[in-house]
């Protein structure tokens, strides 16, 4: 709170003899402290403001709360705020460490087979609510080099990822990632080749996408991923 506003409040309280600080009549020894708060020379109270666990500025007293005022202790407010901050940090770290994954084998219309593996983690450093980081690995099983490469060059194939809770109820909005590199890059999807024994042998392609999260509670309820492959 600005000093001018705090001083105005003090003047009003002194004139009225009551208010948010519940100052009784006859209390006149109010002085500003070097830390920006105010002290009551009659009671020894030091009065200042602290942000509580809900983000609100609260009037409070330093040290033993005076019986002359119905104010909380500044230490109590700070302790509750820090406890909530620590709890939020633990929840965030838990979500970041919680990796959800899934893998399936798919047969293409021409009989070739590919395996698609998915994994996702939560990132709390992006935006107000955070985001999901989704990794997808598409690997050759029985597909030829040309068939496999065409999935990422000329096809309209894509991967669908669904998010489900323990009751198999779908949460969040399914994520669709195109295999076609040109289409995917326009949607900020990153593509990286996975090589075999030599750099000329491409055995898979890794894709990474990011999905903004609007509802953290829904993410916390997710227990599994479901992956589907759509040829076109």
Image: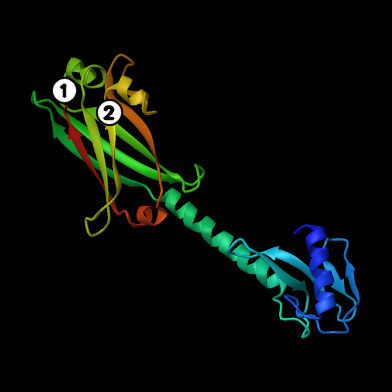
**Which quarter of the rendering shows the N terminus?**
bottom right
Query: Quick check: marks 2 and 1 in contact, CB under 8 Å?
Result: no
Q: Is residue 148 above or below residue 75?
A: above
Looking at the image, which is closer to me, 107 or 79? 79
Query: Image quadrant of residue 72?
Result: bottom right
Task: Give SS at disc 2.
Answer: strand
Residue at 26% x, 41% y: name it: 161
**Which quarter of the rendering shows the C terminus?**
top left
Q: Is residue 185 above or below residue 28?
A: above
Identify residue for label 2: 178
Where does residue 81 sit, x and y in percent of width and height?
62, 64
The crowding category of the residue bearing disc 2, from other C-alpha atoms within 10 Å (few below 14, some 14 to 19, many at least 20), is many
Residue at 39% x, 28% y: name it: 188
Q: Is residue 45 visible?
A: no
Q: Is residue 226 visible?
A: yes
Query: Image quadrant of residue 185?
Result: top left
Residue at 87% x, 65% y: name it: 33
Task: Give SS at disc 1.
Answer: loop
In primary-sequence order, the first of circles 2 and 1 is: 1
Q: Is residue 3 above or below residue 58?
A: above
Query: Image quadrant of residue 231?
Result: top left
The crowding category of the residue bearing disc 1, from other C-alpha atoms within 10 Å (few below 14, some 14 to 19, many at least 20), is some
Q: Nearer the viewer, mark 2 or mark 1?
A: 2
Residue 131 relative to residue 55: left or right: left
Disc number for residue 143? 1
Looking at the image, which is closer to me, 29 or 225? 29
Residue 23 relative to residue 71: left or right: right
Residue 43 relative to residue 65: left or right: right
Residue 77 relative to residue 111: left or right: right
Where does residue 229 sit, x and y in percent of width and height?
19, 34
């Amino acid at each position: 709170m600005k000093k001018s506003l705090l001083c105005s409040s003090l003047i009003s309280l002194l004139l009225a003899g009551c208010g948010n600080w519940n100052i009784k009549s006859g209390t006149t020894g109010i002085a500003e402290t070097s830390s920006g708060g105010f002290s009551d020379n009659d009671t020894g109270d030091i009065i200042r403001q602290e942000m509580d666990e809900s983000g609100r500025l609260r009037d409070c007293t330093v040290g033993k709360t005076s019986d002359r005022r119905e104010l909380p202790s500044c230490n109590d407010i700070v302790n509750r705020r820090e406890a909530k901050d620590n709890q939020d940090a633990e929840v965030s770290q838990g979500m970041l460490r919680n990796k959800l994954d899934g893998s399936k084998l798919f047969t293409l219309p021409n009989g070739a087979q590919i395996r698609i593996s998915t994994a996702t983690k939560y990132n709390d450093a992006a935006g107000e609510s955070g985001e999901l980081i989704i990794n997808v690995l598409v690997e050759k099983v029985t597909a030829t080099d040309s068939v496999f490469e065409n999935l990422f060059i000329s096809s309209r194939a894509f991967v669908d990822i669904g998010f489900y809770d323990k009751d198999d109820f779908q949460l969040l909005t399914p994520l669709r990632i195109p295999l076609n590199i040109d289409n995917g890059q326009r949607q900020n999807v990153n593509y990286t080749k996975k090589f075999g024994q030599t750099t000329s042998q491409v055995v898979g392609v890794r894709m990474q996408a990011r999905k903004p999260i609007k509802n953290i509670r829904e993410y916390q309820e997710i227990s599994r991923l479901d992956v589907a492959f759509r040829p076109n």
